[in-house]
Image: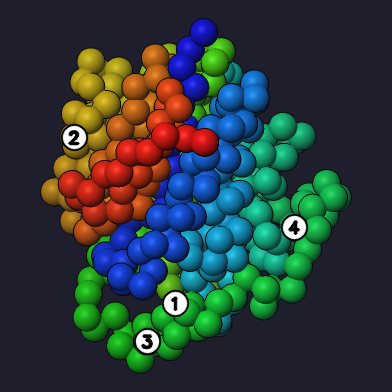
Amino acid sequence: MNPAVVVVHGGGASNISKDRKERVRQGIVKAATVGYNILKEGGSAVDAVEGAVTVLEDDPEFNAGRGSVLNENGEVEMDASIMNGKDLSAGAVSAVRCVANPIKIARLVMEKTPHCFLTDQGAAKFAAASGIPTIPGEQLVTERNKKRLENEKHEKGAQKPDYEKNLGTVGAVAVDCRGNVAYATSTGGIVNKMLGRVGDTPCIGSGGYADNDIGAVSTTGHGESILKVNLARLTLFHMEQGKTLEEAADASLGYMKSKVKGVGGVILVNKAGDWAVKWTSTSMPWGAAKDGKLYSGIDLGDTSITDLP
């Protein structure tokens, strides 16, 4: 029997205000607990990462599902992907609108179509045919994100280079009792993005990757930077070369920073149940559940450990 492990992240962030920190931590803890309970009840790694990410998509504190940032037209367009390390089956969607949980559509793409990736109208048509309910787009929009878009348009990004802001994504990785690994990643993208812009999140190998023989990774950070270095697969490559999980994460994140000035973060597991979380952004809310213990943090050096109920 393999140890059941689930790790979640709530996105690399430049800074999280004090009033939001507790809500963010609660959301992360809930997602990790939900994912872990799925594993404890005999669910698969794929079930666990989908369940954990669904919790974060439904939480307005995170940039995925409800709470997604707005594009230049003030609308929500979301991307998501999921992968099963057992057979490398994968599913992804991009530029989807008016659904609560893009990760659920990504899983259906993986399991019910011969394809890996559907976009925009095709993804919407497939979701509807699969019984995924549509919701009014306004239900995904929060006041906080309306303000963020206004500020962004007003500043025109004068304050910070693009790669240092809007690093929100949500993700999960897991290993189940059968030794299968999986990842899921979901996002609303970046504030004030061009219509139809797609980042790393739905791209297999950038937004995440899962292979039982190596491990599973979910990434967060500046999407364009992550795409350029294939951050998820690059991290696993370093693990294949014999690096520890921490060393592999440091190497790939370091490469992205030195090569394209991109910051972000990764969460990873291997089938032995080892796990790691690393980031180069200011903070990254994360949680990990293993052996009845829940580990969580937001900033560097800030880890709390509690017993799972």
What amino acid is found at the position of numbered circle 1 in the picture? Asn
* Residue 251, numbered circle: 2
Q: Secondary structure at mark 2?
A: helix
Q: Earlier in the sequence, mark 1 or mark 3?
A: 3
Judging depth in this view, the residue of 85 and 303 nearest the camera is 303
Residue at image x 70%, y 66%? 98
Give the spatial CA distance, label 1 vs label 4: 22 Å
Pointer 3: what residue?
A: 151
What amino acid is found at the position of numbered circle 2 in the picture? Ala
Residues at marks 4 and 3 touching, judged by CB atoms closer than 8 Å:
no
Q: Is residue 205 visible?
A: no
The reply, left or right, for residue 196 in relation to residue 127 is: left
Residues at marks 4 and 2 touching, judged by CB atoms closer than 8 Å:
no
Q: Earlier in the sequence, mark 4 or mark 2?
A: 4
204 over 27 or under it: above or below? above
Give the spatial CA distance, label 4 vs label 2: 38 Å
188 over 152 or under it: above or below? above
Pointer 4: what residue?
A: 124
* Circle 3 residues within 10 Å: few <14, some 14–19, many ≥20: some
Q: Earlier in the sequence, mark 4 or mark 3?
A: 4
